[in-house]
Image: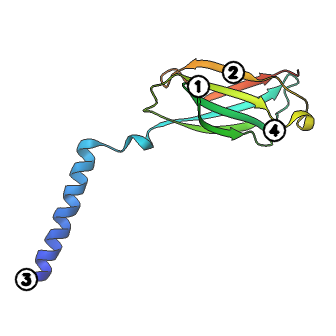
Amino acid sequence: MKTIRNILRWLLGGSFTLIIAACYGIPADYQGKNVKIKCKNTNDQPIPGLELKVLENGLDSSWNTTDAEGTADFFIPEFVSASLMIRAADIDGLSNLGDFQTMILSNLTYGTIETNYTFILTNK
């Protein structure tokens, strides 16, 4: 009899958990957009070692550096309601095909941000 009661407790507890998840959905932390940024120079060559930052209301939200293919990935959560800005800066000088000017993409919101960007940077 105890075994049946324990099995019923586990079944009811699991059912209750599933009902709560079905009613309220998944947490907002798991919803968002994956943004991929590719950085090239004017000769269409990828630029490694650039520092890319996503700024939320002017404050650093997240940052990444470009890899050998000149790409970097970001996750932008859905609950961001602030003004977003993406900034690409050359932090290592001439060691990555040149000394590039900083590029800023501003006035973005979660609703207007795309999932793929290509930045073409020019030498200073």
Residue visible at 19% across and 66% down in the picture: 11
Q: Secondary structure at mark 3?
A: loop
Mark closest to the chain's N terminus, 2 or 4: 4
Give left or right: position of 53 versus 1.
right
Mark 1 Cα-neighbour bin, 10 Å: few <14, some 14–19, many ≥20: few
Query: Which residue position holds label 4?
Result: 48
Q: Secondary structure at mark 2?
A: strand
| Above or below, comparing residue 47 to residue 2 in the picture | above
Q: Quadrant of the C terminus?
A: top right
Mark 4 Cα-neighbour bin, 10 Å: few <14, some 14–19, many ≥20: many
| CB under 8 Å between discs 1 and 2 | no
Give left or right: position of 53 versus 15.
right
Query: Which residue position holds label 2?
Result: 104
Task: Return the mark for residue 58.
Answer: 1
| Above or below, comparing residue 13 to residue 107 in the picture | below
Task: Return the mark for residue 34.
Answer: none
Q: Which is nearer the eye, 51 or 113?
A: 51
| Above or below, comparing residue 73 to residue 84 in the picture | below
| CB under 8 Å between discs 2 and 4 | no
